[in-house]
Amino acid sequence: MNWLSILIFLPIAAALVLLLMPKGAAKVFRPVAITIGVVQTIIAGILYVKYLSNPQGYQFVERYDWINLNLGTFGRLNIDYFLAVDGLSLGLLLLSAFVMTIAAIASSEIQKDPKAYYTLFLLLSAAIMGVFCALDFFLFYVFYELMLLPMYFLIGMWGGPNREYAAIKFFLYTLFGSIFMLLVMIGLYFSVIDPITGEHTFNMLYMMDAANYTKDSYFSIFSSDALLFNYPVRFLGFIVLFIAFAIKIPTIPLHTWLPDAHVEAPTPVSIILAGVLLKIGGYGIIRICYGIFPEAAIYFSYWIGLIGVLSIIYGAFIALASTDLKRMIAYSSISHMGFVILGIASLTSEGVNGAIFQMISHGVLSTMLFYLVGVIYQRVHDREIAAFRGLAQPMPRYTMFVVIAFFASLGLPGLSGFIGEAFTLIGAFKSASVNALLPRGFAILAAVGILIGAAYFLWTLQRMFFGAARFKGAEEWNLKLKDLTATEYVVLIPLALITIFLGVFPSLLFDASNNTINAWVHETWIHGIANLKSMQSLLKF
Amino acid sequence: MEWYLKLQTLIESNNISWKFLLPEYVLLLFFLLGLVIDLFVKHSKLLPILMLAGLAVSGYFTFLQISIPNQNQQLFNGMLLLNNKTIIFKLLLTLVSFIFLLYSLTDQRVKQRRIAEYFYLVPLFLIALNMLCMSSHLISIYMSLEMVSLFSYGYVALAINEKRNAEAAMKYILFGLLASALLLYGISLLYGFSGTLLLLDPNFLAAFAKAPMPIIALSLTLILAGFLFKIAAVPFHFYAPDVYQGTSATTLVLLSIAPKIAGYAMFANFLSCFSFQIFNQQLFWPMYNWETTLSVIASVTIILGSFVAISQTNIKRLMAYAGIAQSGFLLMGLIGYTAIGLVALLNYLFAYVLMTSAAFMLISYFEQQHEAFDLADYKGLVRKSPMAAILLVIVFASLIGLPPFIGFTGKFLLFSASYQAYLSSANPSVLFTIFTAAIGSIISLFYYFKIVRNMFMREETWVKVSSEEQGVLYFLVLPIVIAIIYFGILPSGIIAYIQSLIA
């Protein structure tokens, strides 16, 4: 069975069916989207369990010719439809399917144009699945860009008052990164040769092997004149790709689209954005930036680690100062994704495993947090922190879930956030003695970031939920602020359970990713050092 | 007696040449038919149908010419050149004219004014365009260029909103005259040095080597002017926004595309007399490097078109500047003058025909249905014409170059071709062009999506009641948009076909 293709094309088929349905059938749209999400989650779950039985290398491979052209002197243009997953992408695939399901359930608040909404939603789902499965750079790029159009409309048509600005800002930022990614992709294509056919290729796995580069090509490690503006071309390629994905994650100083997009987006779109789309940045850095340019990754690791640490601290400080609950959570996302960057930069098994764990944990937690914000916003259409006091009085069960989500986010042991942050910190700390890439100070600074994180979460908890009940909307709000409904339980209970479960049994994720990551760290290090030596002797920089 | 023999071979070669102009005869025949019908039957409904049939028949004969075994058929002693490359250009032109005629049938304003010329001039216009594609002699280039310009002016003046179109036509004519005067001056200089006007004459190029370089550079630059005017590239782009604004969007389906295609065809012919080695050889051409010249023009055109488009408030002016930026993109295909560059150019021209014709048909549709001329008039249009609005989004996404639409594969090939040109020449200006093209793509998102934003995210400001006629969307625009998606996902077929023809 072509499981991965089914994962990708199931939502597209559903979207086409939705388009053909009459407007009167609006009631079935959401159930259809939820069903598709559930089916995808089940398929991804089956693949995950299958993979666990033998967690080695790439599995569920599908490979067909997509575009195969003879262009005369230009050579052949070879683009494959090449899908496969490994321990790195499978966890994220499962997370995406799950988050999309939750987002579909959370879409009950969408009243305007349901047909358009769910069609775009399903297209977005297909593109996300494709990004995590594609191993052909061209195919990856197509899926990567395919996410933009649906996301633009989802923010721009169903968002808050300032939605137009937020939507185009998101679109422009991402396109800025990806258009230059396209140029690097073309450059790589002309440098890499498929060892079997002898033609140029977009296959990412071939791009990762230094032996596949033609001798004097631009991106070759063994070229003695691969300089552009007196700078090694491979380093420039790395920087361009890193910027493209750093926009997606986002890290400072490329993060400014995120708070706008989050604040304006409706709850389900915020969930997708934080739960899935940010992970594509982290995934891209691990798979593509580090995979293809290991020597640049090692060369720049100090700066990458620094960006991670600064994101952690900067995000935490802004979150501390935020007055809007959703904005606070958006900035806390920047802070939490900083740990991912730090973990990757450490290039240790603990750090990178921790980074993947942190991505999945953050995917679940941010879904929960944004959903919780959505719960009160739906009731009173306000989410100013100062507008609420003593929310625990009218909404005790809601408060319980908030407490779980907050404590998990601030890194309380026993909950999922702790594992991710702890492992990335261990990795960052160990790096100094193992590979001397990051100074120990980074780990210490990041730990300070956790402290600030604890401060803003606890402070918010105290300000909004504890004490005597007093709301901006007075009596009117008292009536509106009812405790959780059945649907909300359906969403929140699994999320809370997963958080606790992952916190207690982190091996559930590590079992799948560990082999892949160990091999990846090893190869990145070996190849990186070898490449760096060769480049330094040839290019003399 | 020698002169008699010469004359005889001349006549014989001409006699052979005539048969290769079959598609053009068909067009001429249908034009004459139209003329006669219009004399006797006023407002004949048959006339447009007949013209469509004429285009189809002529297109079919053009298509048949592909199988002519003898490549690079020189007609009329080198006045015209017929090869597969020019045939593709001619087919593209026939396609545009066909789409234009078909769409004009639905244009209410054309119907009301009942101008028969509007229809029966199309075949004649197409003859001129075809001639320009085939020209390989400086005189035939000049003459067909003038002929194309003449009909272009005519169409601007024939268009519907009377107030502006006279002014627009006047501007078009004045700029056109300037450009063709420069072209003619360049031609005469070249003739003075080489003693021949025949592009394929080996003496033509050989004479350049002996001539003083500054003058050759000057004359080549002057010839460039005529070409840049046709494709609306900087610095000969000034007329485009005014002309676009002054004429109807329906006319622009033809005028924004056809002269551009013919211009590229003519210039590709002109460049073909420089072999690839000479093309980039710094030693032989110390003063004039085509690669640098074209890169700089392409960069400046993309940057200027993109940035000025941002501040436009009229949709047709915006499309004019966007079209200028697109011209810069198309120029990227000619920069290296490589085989792949030509494939990329032809492929993108095909994409351009689909995208731009669909865009102007939709803009014309909005003009007629909702009297939408300014960007502000597009507010909330998705509520009134959801189908048209969604189609326009897809067309714009394709014009920006987002996958999975034809514009993406088109731009991808152009980027690849320029990158390859850069690899072989290491000319930094080519790299600069690639860079500006990337920036231009990002900016194009911004201005195209201003329209999208108005359509989808703003509330309508005023209500214009009109009877919605959606027929044209389904039978004409929708198939084109489906083609845009189809060739975006499966581009192999069309690219391989173009490649096999010009290889």
Image (cartoon, coloured by chain):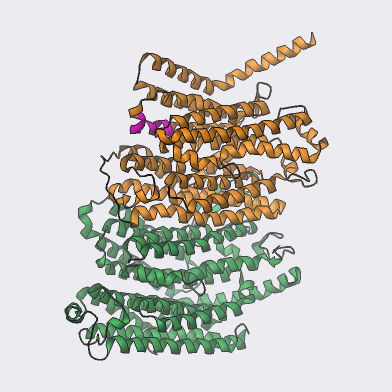
> Is residue A195 found left or right of B152 in the rendered image?
right
Query: In which quadrant is the C terminus of chain A drawn?
Result: bottom right
**In screen coordinates, is B287 left or right of A257?**
right
Would residue B102 be counted in the magenta stretch?
A: yes
Where does residue A340 sit, x and y in percent of width and height? 49, 78
Q: Position of residue A539 (x, y in %)?
A: 74, 68
* Colour applied to chain B: orange
Q: Chain A's colour? A: green
Q: Which corner quadrant of the image does residue B33 belong to?
A: top left
Horizontal and vertical percent position of residue A133: 46, 64
Q: Residue shown at 50%/38% (left/top)? A: B257
* Residue A47 can be seen, yes or no: no
Viewer-closest of A336 and B375: B375
Figure check: A53 above or below B377: below
Eyeballing the image, is B93 above or below A411?
above
Q: Position of residue B327 (x, y in %)?
A: 56, 44
Indicate the quadrant containing the N terminus of chain A: top left, top right, bottom left or bottom right: bottom left
Residue A279 visible to the viewer: yes
Residue at coordinates 34% horizontally, 45% vertically from top-left? B388
Can you name the residue that lies furthest to the bottom here? A467
Viewer-proximal residue, A128 or B425?
A: B425
Look at the magenta stretch and give its main secondary structure.
helix
Which residue is at the front of the view, B248 or A260? B248
In the depicted structure, whether residue A414 falls above or below residue A24: below
Residue B213 colored in magenta in the image: no
In the image, the segment drawn in magenta is: B100-110
Residue pushed farthest top?
A: B1
Residue extending furthest toward the right: B210
| Residue B43 in the image: above or below residue A81 | above
- Considering depth in this image, is B72 or A231 the residue closer to the camera? A231
